[in-house]
Amino acid sequence: LPSKPKIFHGRDSELHEIVSTLYQDSARVAILGAGGMGKTSLARAVLHHPGIISKYEQRIFVGCDSARTSIDIAAQIGMHLGLKAGKDLTKCVVEYFSQTSIGPTLLTLDNLDTPWEPKETRGAVEELISLLTEIPHLALMITMRGAERPAKVRWTRPFLPPLEPLSDDAAHQTFVDIADDFHNSADITQLLNLTDNMPLAVDLVAHLVGYEDCSTILSRWKTEKTSLLSCGHDRKSSLDASINISLTSPRITSCPGALELLSLLSVLPDGLSDAELLQSHLPIQDILSCKAALLSTALAFNNDHKCLKSLVIIREHVQNFYSPQATLLQPLRKHFHLLLDLYRTYQGAHQTTGIINEITRNLGNLQNVL
């Protein structure tokens, strides 16, 4: 098993919920969320929880980030079980877990999105997962990017919502545990605001501060943006690499307008409501399908005002690599100008209440776009 995470803050409620679910027989849990949101760390914490250790005789952790097909997943599981290598170990893996002599077992499939994501392999991956979940004494926990759970599985309720950024306190504690607490608190807050409390970003920026002071990092951020947190080359050590995995996923590439919509969101800190998406007449085909693609990959989310928006750290990356074209911004500018014209026309009248609310909700957008 991978080790228990040494620095782990802000996920107590999710940890408790997963452990409670896994106390049930034949539980099936999906840990979802955007890349860099700490899904693997949470899974590791679950595996080392005293209650899980006492319930499950076997706890197996299989990384799927190098797997491309269901056969690859079966091979990885087989390797962990010590099975003899073969062309397709699916049947052998199922037979192994089905043995009555095998006690309660928790199988964790980490980064399952890698083999599941392509449409041509998705069905077979879901079939494998379905076969595994038919085994009574086998519990399943998966981690996946996005907000979609694989089909063909009856996931145990209540579903765990996709992971959100850490609370301010948890992000601060994580930062301090890595970089120490002698730094200026205002600088720390400013740095954490840039990360939007995404765990991976907090971790990377805290390690940078470990050998460069906060003011230097803040200064470098102005020109380097997310590349500052991308010294490594994989999803765990490079923020750009992590985000790019989601941007190049089949769910995004199969919906060409999704990246265009995300590029637009990158300059809209307040996001856009469905009404604004439609009324601004953006030159993006099937724009609501594009919205669904962004939500399913967790590259965007609906905020409390039901507006589609992205995290700061994703917006910065997209601005750097996929800045919006003028043809996208022009109709939005026109929409906002019309909104302001309406306010000026009916200023003081009763019907301006809704207009004022919309303007207030878009103050950041107006500042960026107009």
Image (cartoon, grey):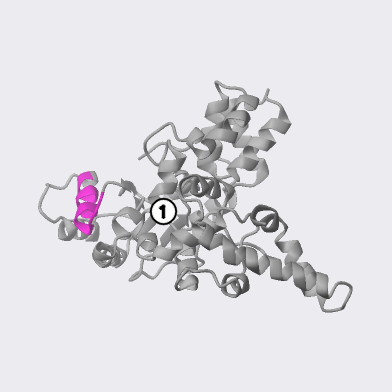
Q: Residue 241: horizontal and vertical position, in percent?
A: 40, 42
Which sits in the foreground, 50 or 222? 222
The residue most toward the left is 87
Q: Is residue 14 left or right of residue 258?
A: right
Spot the residue most to the right.
348
Seen in the picture, residue 67 relative to 211 is either above or below; the reply is: below
Is residue 177 on the magenta stretch? no
Would you say 316 lies left or right of 105 here? Answer: right
Q: Is 301 drawn above or below residue 320 in the view shown?
A: below
Q: Is residue 316 visible?
A: yes
Quarter occupied by residue 334: bottom right
Q: Amino acid at mark 1?
A: Leu
* Front one among 34 and 328: 328
Say above or below: 186 vs 343. Answer: above
Q: Is residue 186 above or below residue 101?
A: above
Magenta region, main secondary structure: helix
The residue that label 1 is drawn on is 247
How many dots with numbers?
1
Mark 1 falls on what kind of element? helix
- At 46% from the left and 50% from the top, the residue drawn is 322
**Which span of residues is magenta-colored?**
67-79
Residue 31, horizontal then vertical, whole percent:
45, 56
Residue 47 visible in the displayed image:
no
Quadrant placement of the N terminus: top left
Q: Residue at image x 50%, y 62%?
A: 261
Q: Residue placed at 72% from the left, 30% from the top?
A: 185
What is the x, y in percent for residue 177?
A: 59, 30
